[in-house]
Amino acid sequence: MITWQIFLYIISSGMYFSLMALGFGFTLRSVKFFNLAYGGAFLVGGYMMFFFYRSLSIFFPAALLFSIITSGLYLFLCYIFIFRALLRRKAKSLVLLIASFGVLVATSAILGMIFGNQPTFVPRRLSDVGTVNILGATLNTSEFFLIIFAFIIIVTFSYMRFHTRFGRATRAIEDDSEVAELVGIPKDKTISRIFFISGICAGLGGVVEGLNSGLIPASGLFYMLPTIVAAVVGGMQSFWGGILGAFILVIVQQLTIFFFGASWVQAVPFAILIIMLFVRPEGILKR
Amino acid sequence: MSKTGKIVLWVIVLILIVWGIVVMNKKGPAEDALTIKIGFVGPLTGDLANMGENAQAAVGIAVEEINKAGGILGKQIEVVYEDDACTGATGANAVSKLINTDKVVAILGSACSGATLGEAPISEAAKVPQLSFCSTNPTISQAGDYIFRDVPSDLFQAKYAAEYLVKNNKTKVALLTTKNDWGDGLNKAFTEAFAKAGGTIVMTSSFNPDAKDFRTELVKIKAANPDAVYFAGYTDGTITALKQSQELGMTAQFFGADAWDDTKIWSELGTLGNGAMYTVVGTNSSDAFKAKMKAKLGKDDLVYCSNYAYDGVKILAEAMNRANSSNSTAIKDALYKTSYTGGVGSKELSFDVNGDPTSAAYIIKIAKDGKATEMVQ
Amino acid sequence: MEYLYHILILISMYGILALAQNLVMGTTGLLTIAGAAFYGIGAYTAAILATKFGFNIFSTLFIAPLAAGLIALMVGESFARFRDDYFMLATLGFLMIFNTVARNWEDFTGGSYGIAGIPKPHIFGFVFDTPLSFMWLSLVIIMIVTTITYFISRSSFGRVLNAIREDEDALSVFGYKTSTYKLLVFAIGAALSSLSGVLFASYLTFIDSNLFTVNESILLWAMVILGGLAKNRGALLGALLLIVIPEGLRFIGFPVEFAALLRQCMYGLLLVFLMLYRPKGILGTYKL
């Protein structure tokens, strides 16, 4: 019984981090830097959901749509105004990292000033979020739907990647962006879209978190760390790597909590990271 | 050095010089002859910001009342508010500033035990009396000659909870406590008291203060099948954990401690919190005080600590009058002679040799439909 | 006046950290996020030795660098073959693990309680317990650290470090064992950072694991980058600015909650602007 319940948790957390790592991986692979502003998009998505759904009392699906579009726009604008200029200058990935960190910090602070430092919960009443019984174990409805949606998103993205022109363009840019440009691929347009899509993923993650545990400004950075680990461990260059990394991370985390207690759980992602760096720095999956 | 670099450097130096002059002039003579300064330190940001702001309002009310009645020793009281974000480090910094820069004669604070424990050595070394209005960790009793509190130590709170649970046939309990001074203190105290009362602890688990996901631990606890879960958590963790426990369909009695008296917890949880109970020091709150709080905050929100914060101001004022001086050491000596009655926190209060209140009266509150109310036993 | 001493003490502490960070990251080009960890190791060493074993803080000023240096050698040795991004990730991992261990190993580090009541240093009967005297102590230490880093930068050792930053592969072709140099500078940086940790522990009288987090390390990055990489003066300037300006904000009288967030916001925007418009930093010649 417990095992089945824990198994369900692993699935739901795994899908959650898969989604996060997937979106993060898009920018990591195409523009080759750790975009910490992803954490900012995460926060924007979640807080906007609170704003649309709770403050403005908009119908849930519509609020969801508005929120993730906003978070997508957020990353898109970050690209247009900040990262594009840096990329054009061929700035080092460290510069981009620092700039993205600055964006994350500023975003967290601004959202904190608007919404306050205490946890912000998205559901209008927490009891609204019902539970779903699956063969004796339970998940709450947001976790349940997340599994379904994340699965759909993963399928959609993989289709997009391998069967559309846009997907081909992204793969070309990941491979060699200069050659891609030479061959006529609209680099700027493609990358803009990549950032937008990345923002959608992050925003969705933020909404889920807002439904489950509430958001605080510090959540942005907090969730970036395991996301980075999942992406790196699974394989930075691989589309499926993020998903693999996410599940490895979640499984080890749950086992740690189960056997050692929750207080050591923070170190887990990083222990895995360090082990991976020794054994296989590129991550598990090559491409 | 490049030209731009040089210019920037000179501009910065200039700004620093001007700023330095302004700062120097601001500080001026140490004693402002017209007011008596008291410091307030509390969690104005962070997980317990709601409690901190609430206490701040209560202190404001107390000060207004005293000043309107003529102040103390002929002078008006001025409170300098500082934030400690519920951490010892920020608190230590804040208290340093209060003592060294603002030259306060006494400090009211803090709420979080961890913060108070970080701040106490500084106040003690500077010989400035510090009165905590909400910190319950047992070790504060030994924090120093200048350290007082008007709420009792957790040794009593845990004991009260343990005895209540045993009395109500909840003899198998699982512990779930947050990993900080307050949570660890309760964990230890409860474990001892519960064993003494004849109960058994089926499992114990502690979690990081910023943990967001309690599901796995709750599953473990559910499997151990306890009658009750003694859960020492702050606002954020409590909301999440209670919600997740309901999702899991747990039927064990959830029992908490004083930090659960944050109204935000129950208003967020709504019906999900139904049936949860917690101990909290009783208050002697009056409708008049509640009305004043409502007027000041613009909403109906009275966290129990705020009663003690209000009393704290009055106790300090009384001590100063008794000592007929605003000298910190004199205040400290006078505090030990306190015999305060008619407060909104406690009906009567005096301090023992450790600076702790001599009596403790707890009540149990139970949550229902978004509100926690006192349970008649 | 005492507020001024307080500021100078803070500037000294962070100045030491910035100088150390600059030595490792700016001069040598090792992207380390572990700065806060060695800072923490210094602080905990001092705190534990002083509170549990009655050591004089003054003596811990000599012991802490040894401890930090040793740990740095072990960590650095394991991470030596990582380059750039991977090295950074590894040091991030080290910091997070250090943080978790500090938070959980209660018997040793006080865990979530932290360690309180850390005494002030004393020498020949004189106790540094006034802000003024502590300030002098801090200034003396930062001057020593500045001298050390200055000499390192100017020495042939320093030249090799700069060369490693520019083109490590070329250097190894010339027969230099670059990994040894990197290891050495990493350890030196750790030792210097730990000095600041000792001062911090003694000044604040209270430490806990929340003080040594990723945010602290990133603050150090910001100081070094703002001031200008590979220039000791830059590190000091960066420390000065990033301490003074937020403190100055305190006086503008925003409500407390806002002030902290506003500081954070400005700090984030500062990083963005620096990267966009002046990656050299103020005094730097080396562009990031």
Image: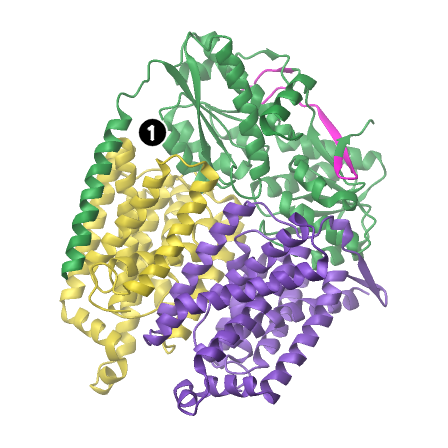
Q: Amino acid at mark 1?
A: Asn
Q: Position of residue B7 (x, y in %)?
A: 16, 53
Query: Which residue sits furthest bottom?
Result: A183
| Rendered image coloring scheme | by chain
* Rendered-image quadrant of the N terminus of chain B: bottom left
Which residue position is annotated with label 1?
A: B100
What residue appears at the point 31 percent right and 50 percent down from the top-left corner?
C242
Does the image show residue C127?
no
Q: Check the picture and name the quadrant holding the C terminus of chain B.
A: top right
Q: Which hue is chain C drawn in? A: yellow
For the residue pair B226 and A37, the one nearer the viewer reads as A37
Q: Is residue C17 left or right of residue C210?
A: left
The residue sitting at 38% across, 52% down in the picture is C267
Does residue C75 appear left or right of residue B274 in this picture? left
Hue used for the chain lettered B: green
Indicate the quadrant where residue A148 lies: bottom right
- When the figure is inspected, residue B135 is found, relative to residue A178, above or below; the finding is above
Q: Position of residue C169 (x, y in %)?
A: 27, 84
Q: Is residue B347 left or right of residue C188?
A: right
Q: Position of residue B116 (x, y in %)?
A: 50, 34
Within the image, what quadrant is residue C138 found in? Answer: top left
Left or right side of A138 for C8: left
Residue B33 within the segment the image draws in magenta: no
Q: What's the chain of the residue with tag 1?
A: B
- Range shown magenta: B348-371
Note whether A274 is above or below C23 in the view shown.
below
Q: Colour of chain A?
A: purple
Q: Nearer the viewer, residue C255 or A287?
A: C255
